[in-house]
Image (cartoon, rainbow, N blue to C red):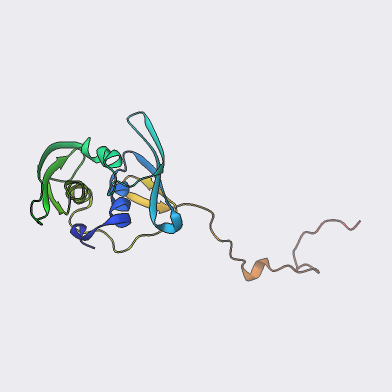
Amino acid sequence: MNVADLTDVALDYWVARSLYDFVREIHFTDGGRTVAIRGTDRGRPWDGRFTPSGSWEAAALVLDRARRLEIVAGAHGTDAHCVADFEGGLRAVEGRGESTRIALLRAFVASRFGDTVADGMLREPQALMGAIAEVIGEASAQPSPEDVPTPNGRIGDIQSAPR
């Protein structure tokens, strides 16, 4: 998916994935409509909803990572434009959006992952290890045919002594 097309929960998710120096876990709340994170940023713990596309409080985490930032606010129906260089980013990047916040967030994701990200989101709890996300939680235990209970035992089974 093009980073320029990310909106709402998809943008929030990829911003959280881009903050791998801060975010330890990503979860989804409200039936999968809201991103929640656990992490610590420069001594400040965060455990709860993370909605940078709708809140400057969360988007400030991205703003704090900018080393160079130029923003042109959209006027009269035009998109806002952002050119930024972020600490830990791949290169200086551009972002566009209906607001300066959206342009900033898209630029940040592009600085970490390039112009495209994987299609869709895995709406399961994830742990971040660098830029890689790994699903966490209990694996479903699938019984194997060898684990089927056999009351009479099998040849070679060591059974308890009769009582």
Q: Is residue 92 visible?
A: no
Q: Residue furthest bottom?
A: 145
Q: Picture quarter containing residue 38? A: top left
Q: Could you tell me which residue is drawn at 30 percent across and 57 percent down?
A: 10
Relative to the observer, which residue lies in front, 23 or 46? 46
Q: Residue furthest right?
A: 163
- Quadrant for the N terminus, please: bottom left
Q: Position of residue 130 (x, y in %)?
A: 32, 44
Q: Picture quarter containing residue 40? A: top left
Q: Could you tell me which residue is drawn at 86 percent across and 56 percent down?
A: 161
Q: Is residue 118 visible?
A: yes
The tally of labels here is 0
Q: Picture quarter containing residue 72? A: top left
- Quadrant for the C terminus, please: bottom right
Q: Residue furthest top?
A: 43
Relative to the observer, which residue lies in front, 2 or 55? 55
Horizontally, residue 124 falls left or right of residue 66, namely right
Q: Position of residue 51 (x, y in %)?
A: 33, 47
Horizontally, residue 76 falls left or right of residue 158, namely left
Relative to the observer, which residue lies in front, 99 or 81? 99
Relative to the observer, which residue lies in front, 130 or 155? 130
Q: Could you tell me which residue is drawn at 13 percent across and 45 percent down?
A: 91
Q: Position of residue 41 (x, y in %)?
A: 33, 34
Horizontally, residue 113 falls left or right of residue 85, namely right
Horizontally, residue 151 falls left or right of residue 9, namely right
Q: Position of residue 12 (x, y in %)?
A: 31, 51
Q: Could you tell me which residue is drawn at 89 percent across and 58 percent down?
A: 162
Q: Is residue 30 above or below residue 45?
A: below
Q: Is residue 26 above or below residue 32?
A: above
